[in-house]
Image (cartoon, rainbow, N blue to C red):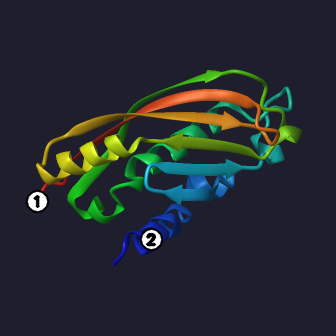
C-alpha cells in the first residue's frame, strides 16, 4: 500500500474520533512533514467573550502537531507507538467566533523526517518538538504552540 493510500486511511480514522466530531476539526492538507487542520467555531465552542475557548484552540494545535509527527512515517505506524508527552501554547490574539474558521499548521523538516525514520528502523525512541501556528480566516496568528511527540518501538 502506498503512502497516499495509508494517509487517507489515517485521515478516515481521525474523523471517527469523538473529540474531532465535537470540535468539527477537519483536515485541509496532509503531506509528509506537513499537516494543516481547520475548525470553524460553533456557538457551543465560545467562551463568555464570544471567543473560541482556549481549550479548543489547544486541542486544534495538538491535533495538527500529532498529525505532522506521523505524516512522514505513515507506512511505519504498525511498528511504532506515538503519544504526546507535553504541549505549550501562547495565545497571541483573541480568537473571535466570527473570525473563523481557524487553521492550525504544523511542519517538520525533511531532515527531521529522515531522522525519525532512521530511529524507527533502529528501534530507538525519539522525541520530536513539533511547532504549530494557529491563524484566523485572514491569516492573522492567534496562537503559537509546540508539542513533544514521543515515538517509540511498538512492543511485541
Q: Mark 1 and mark 2: span between their CA atoms? A: 27 Å
On the image, the x and y values in percent for residue 36 come to 59, 50
Q: How many marks?
A: 2
Query: Which of 102 and 141 lies nearest the eye of the viewer?
Result: 141
On the image, the x and y values in percent for residue 29 come to 59, 57
Instruction: Give the labeled residue for mark 2.
Output: 4
* Image quarter of residue 140: top right
- Quadrant including the C terminus: bottom left
Instruction: Give the labeled residue for mark 1.
Output: 156
Query: Which of 82 and 141 lies nearest the eye of the viewer?
Result: 141
Residue name at image x 46 percent, y 48 percent: 68
Q: Are marks 1 and 2 in contact (CB under 8 Å)?
A: no
Residue name at image x 44 percent, y 32 percent: 147
Q: For the view shown, which residue lies furthest in the front direction?
A: 111
**In the image: residue 87, left or right of residue 22:** left
Residue name at image x 38 percent, y 52 percent: 70
* Mark 2 Cα shell of 10 Å, populated few (<14), some (14-19), many (≥20): some
Which circle, 1 or 2, is nearer the viewer? 2
Secondary structure, mark 1, is loop
Residue 26 drawn above or below residue 56: below
Residue name at image x 66 percent, y 36 percent: 134
**In the image: residue 148, left or right of residue 44:** left
On the image, the x and y values in percent for residue 110 come to 37, 46
- Quadrant including the N terminus: bottom left
**In the image: residue 74, left or right of residue 60:** left
On the image, the x and y values in percent for residue 62 come to 51, 40
Amino acid at each position: 500500500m502506498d503512502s497516499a493510500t495509508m494517509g487517507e486511511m489515517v485521515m478516515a480514522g481521525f474523523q471517527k474520533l469523538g473529540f474531532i466530531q465535537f470540535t468539527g476539526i477537519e483536515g485541509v492538507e496532509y503531506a509528509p512533514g506537513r499537516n494543516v487542520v481547520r475548525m470553524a467555531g460553533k456557538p457551543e465552542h465560545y467562551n463568555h467573550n464570544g471567543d473560541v475557548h482556549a481549550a479548543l484552540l489547544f486541542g486544534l494545535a495538538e491535533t495538527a502537531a500529532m498529525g505532522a509527527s506521523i505524516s512522514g512515517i505513515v507506512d511505519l505506524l504498525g511498528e511504532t507507538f506515538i503519544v504526546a508527552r507535553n504541549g505549550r501554547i501562547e495565545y497571541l490574539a483573541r480568537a473571535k467566533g466570527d473570525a473563523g474558521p481557524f487553521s492550525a499548521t504544523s511542519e517538520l523538516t525533511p531532515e527531521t523526517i529522515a531522522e525519525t525514520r532512521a530511529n524507527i528502523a533502529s528501534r530507538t525512541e525519539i522525541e520530536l518538538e513539533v511547532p504549530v501556528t494557529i491563524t484566523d480566516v485572514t491569516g492573522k496568528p492567534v496562537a503559537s504552540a509546540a508539542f513533544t511527540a514521543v515515538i517509540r518501538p511498538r512492543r511485541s
